[in-house]
Structure formats: structure tokens, C-alpha cells
Amino acid sequence: MNFDLSDAMREIAKLTRAQKLTEATRLIQSTLRGRNLPPSDPGQHETHDKPMRFRRPLGDVVNTLRRLKQGLEAPSAKRRKAVVVPEGAQFLSSSFECPAGHRDYRLYIPSNHEGTVRPLIVMLHGCKQDPVDFAIGTQMNAIAEEHGLYVLYPAQSAQSNPMACWNWFNPKDQLRDSGEPTILSGMTRHIVSQHNIDQRRVFVAGLSAGGAMSAILGATYPDIYAGIGVHSGLPYQAANDVVSAFAAMRGEASANRNIRGTPRLPTIVFHGDADPTVHPSNADRIIASQAQAGDTTEVEISADRTYTRRVTRERTGKLLSEHWLIHKGQHSWSGGSMEGSFTNPHGPDASREMVRFFLQVVPHESRSDSCMVMQSD
């Protein structure tokens, strides 16, 4: 017995509601080919692998099923809330271009930005994310509003990486005045020059590939960034191609080519000890890259044993680094909102702790610009 499009759509919806996404995807694929597969209930319909008869134009059918298939294969792209902007605040959309390339961005301007200069946090999203998704998931705008901070969310382009990953593993994207570091540092300088921002208090943080790029920016532009935050990311120079990138993500120590020799920059790291995507040993390497003889480390274990925090200070007592190991944590932003992708609402609030850490550290002086603005707000 042949069943038409409405039968197929009902069956796909049933499978989706039951979270049987593999079966739903197979049914969509077979429908696109004009054939039917057995439904989730084997006794519900007969199937003979015959061509289907559609009651709607074939073009409409194909487009509908393709959109459905894309939704099933990209669970991180779920329907999400719009960014809530308090009265007097702004969440601007614009772009930046320099000789190294072009990127879009979103900029959060707090409602209380008038008067004294304000800090800036650059937030780099992970793979399969975008600035709006990342802002919603980390809830960084709400915390920035409390403290009067600007937040810059650069967007990776599909042309540069189809998965929206920052290219932290490419050699040219790990150097000063080259590739993505040039674009991101140039965008940061542009925002500082155009708004009421304290250039001594500019910080960068990110998740996964965004965390790895944050480590790169801290190593290559310590004159711009006063501190870095890395969530579920990797250390500077962890890889030099795709093969070594996967080795680094598995936690192979040989993949990290330069633990030492990077600038000592205040660093806060969050990582889940059950992360299946990026091995937690990468967090250890990030912290180790900042350590020197004479540093002191204090260890704190939460009362409910959900995390272990290690705070390292220089010999002078200056705060150098914090390492938050989230017990049973996966590859997700700790304390984030489920309205965004790759978030875990449980555990310590990584966004709030990063802001607290950044506002504690002693900032660095900034130097002159090296990437000219070709397109501005």
C-alpha cells in the first residue's frame, strides 16, 4: 500500500516526538527519493518500497522535507528566544573589515554606559553557534548589564568554516598580524575606539573552538587583552592541521607544541571532567602555560562536590589563574541557559565567575592599531 505526503509527515512527526531522530531522518530521506520505509509501528502500514503518490506539487514536497531534515540534523539550531534588551541598552548588529578579511558581529551596550569608561568582553562562540545563540546561552548580556560592561560577539563566517568554528588549528590563524587573530584584534580595537571603553580593561573569552581562539588572542595580542577565559577549549599552538587538532582534542600531549613561552596573562578556565569532545587535560595545559616557579595554588572543592577550583597567584600575591573543573561536566557552558545550544544550567555560573575574575585582575596597557577599518557601524 502506498501512503501520501500527509501519511509521511504524520509518521515523521510521531518519530520526532518520540526522539527517534535516526528513524525520522531515514524516513525523510526515503520520502525525498520517492519511496516509503516501514513506520515506527511495523503493523501500522504495509510497505512494498514502491514510488509514492503526492497530492501536492513535487517542488513543494521536496522543499518541505528538506527543511524538516535540516532541522533534525541540527538540534543545536532549535527555536530560541529573542535576546532581551533592557530599556536604555542596545544589541547592535554590524560588521568589520580589514585586509585580512570580513566578519559580522553583535555588540551589547549597557544602559548605564554614559559617564566613566567601561570594560569590554569579547565573546567567541563555539562550532555550530552564532552570536545570538551564544549571547542567549551564556546570559552574558544580563551580567554585563549589572556591571556596566560592553560585550562584543564576533561571528565566524560560513565561507571561512562551514561548521562556524574558529580556525584555531590553522598555522596562519595562530599568528599576530595574520588571519583570524588580525581580524578579531582589529575588530576589538575598532569597538574600543568608537565607544566609551577603557582600553586597559579589555578581555576575551570563548567556548570550545572559541576558547581555543581566545587563548591564541591572549598569546598574540597581550597588548590588547588584559585577561582570557577559556571554556572547554585548547591551549595556544595545540595543533597545526586537522589531524593534530583531533589529536589535541583527544588529549594527546604531543599535539601541544608550545606550553611554555606564552605571555603570562590572567587566565580563567572552565572544563568538564567528562567532556567527550575536548579532553580535560587541555585545561591543565592552558594553566601550565602560565605557571612559573614561586607561584602558589589554593584548592577549593565545593560542598556538594560538583566542582574543584584551583586558584594560582604570583609570588607577589597577584591573581594569575583560576581552573574550574566541573565534575561530570560535558562539552557545555556551565551555568548557561537551556534556551541556547551547548549549555548546562547546573553547576557554577561560568559567565558570572569570568566577569568577577576579569574585574579583579590588573589590566595591561594597549598599544597602537595595526588593522585599518574598512567598514564600520
Image (cartoon, rainbow, N blue to C red):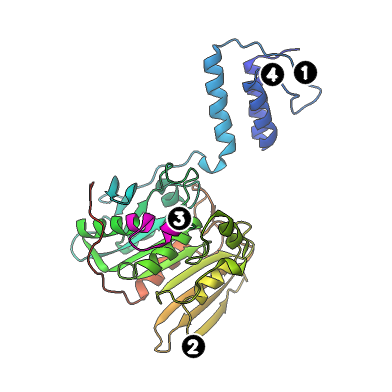
Q: Label for residue 235?
A: none
Contact between marks 1 and 4 (CB within 8 A): the answer is no
Q: Position of residue 302 (x, y in %)?
A: 58, 73
Q: Which residues are magenta?
A: 170-183
Viewer can see residue 75? yes
| Tag 2 near tag 3, CB within 8 Å | no
Which quadrant of the rendered structure holds the N terminus?
top right
Q: Amino acid at mark 2?
A: Ala
Q: Is disc 4 in contact with disc 2, using a CB cutoff of under 8 Å?
A: no
Determine the CA span between mark 3 and mark 4.
43 Å
First of labels 2, 3 by sequence position: 3
Indicate the secondary structure of the residue bearing disc 2.
loop
Local crowd size for mark 3, using a 10 Å CA cut-off: few (<14), some (14–19), many (≥20):
many
Residue 138 marker: 3
Q: Is residue 258 left or right of residue 91?
A: right
Q: Which residue is mark 4?
A: 35
Q: Which mark is residue 47?
A: 1
Mark before the other along the chain sequence, 1 or 4: 4
The x and y percentages for residue 277 are 60, 56
Which amino acid type is marked by label 3? Answer: Thr
CB atoms at circles 2 and 1 under 8 Å apart?
no
- Residue sitting at x 58%, y 31%: 69
Circle 3: element type = helix
Which residue was labeled with disc 2? 293
